[in-house]
Image (spheres, rainbow, N blue to C red):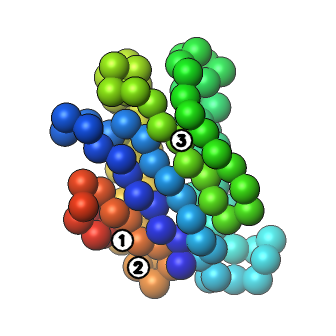
Amino acid sequence: MITVRFFVSGGQVTGFALSGHANSASYGKDAVCSAVSSAAYMTANTLTEVCGLPVRSEVRDGYMKLVLTPKKADRAKELLDGFSLHIRALAKQYPKNLRVIYGGIKNA
């Protein structure tokens, strides 16, 4: 199962961490994993390369973490909220493969 934890400060998303594997299909054919990974990388690349925002990040097999300061996250509010919306929609569609933790509430 993939777990997506959204970091919240002052009521706004300031980053996220993804961990695990969806295990909805064999490696390389897992649509849930592909959808989550693609959305996360698009968000990360837009924040750093398009918006030019400094982020703290860590990436390794089965794990990605990205964190902004609250001030910088304010500049990226719409993008982070859109990513959160997309991930929550995927979690509703694939509840056995994707868990969302947002503001301390599981599957928010």
Element carrying mark 1: helix
Q: Nearer the viewer, residue 45 or 54?
A: 54
Q: Amino acid at mark 1?
A: Lys
- The residue at 63%/74% (across/down) is 21
In which quadrant of the rendered view does residue 9 lie? top left
Q: Image quadrant for the C terminus?
A: bottom left
Residue 29: % across, % down: 76, 74
Around disc 2, counting alpha carbons within 10 Å, would you say few (fewer than 14), some (14 to 19), or many (20 or more)? Answer: some
Closer to the N terminus: mark 3 or mark 2? 3
Which of discs 3 and 2 lies nearer the camera? The answer is 3
Q: Mark 3 near mark 2, Cβ–Cβ under 8 Å?
A: no
Q: Amino acid at mark 2?
A: Pro
In which quadrant of the rendered view does residue 76 lie? top left
Q: CA distance from mark 1 to mark 3?
A: 23 Å
Residue 18 visible, this angle? yes
Q: Mark 1 near mark 3, Cβ–Cβ under 8 Å?
A: no
Around disc 1, counting alpha carbons within 10 Å, would you say few (fewer than 14), some (14 to 19), or many (20 or more)? Answer: some
Residue 93: % across, % down: 41, 73
Which of discs 1 and 3 lies nearer the camera? The answer is 3
Residue designated by label 1: 92
- The residue at 72%/56% (across/down) is 60
Q: Mark 1 near mark 2, Cβ–Cβ under 8 Å?
A: yes
Around disc 3, counting alpha carbons within 10 Å, would you say few (fewer than 14), some (14 to 19), or many (20 or more)? Answer: many
Residue 67: % across, % down: 48, 37
Residue designated by label 3: 66
In the image, residue 34 above or below residue 77: below
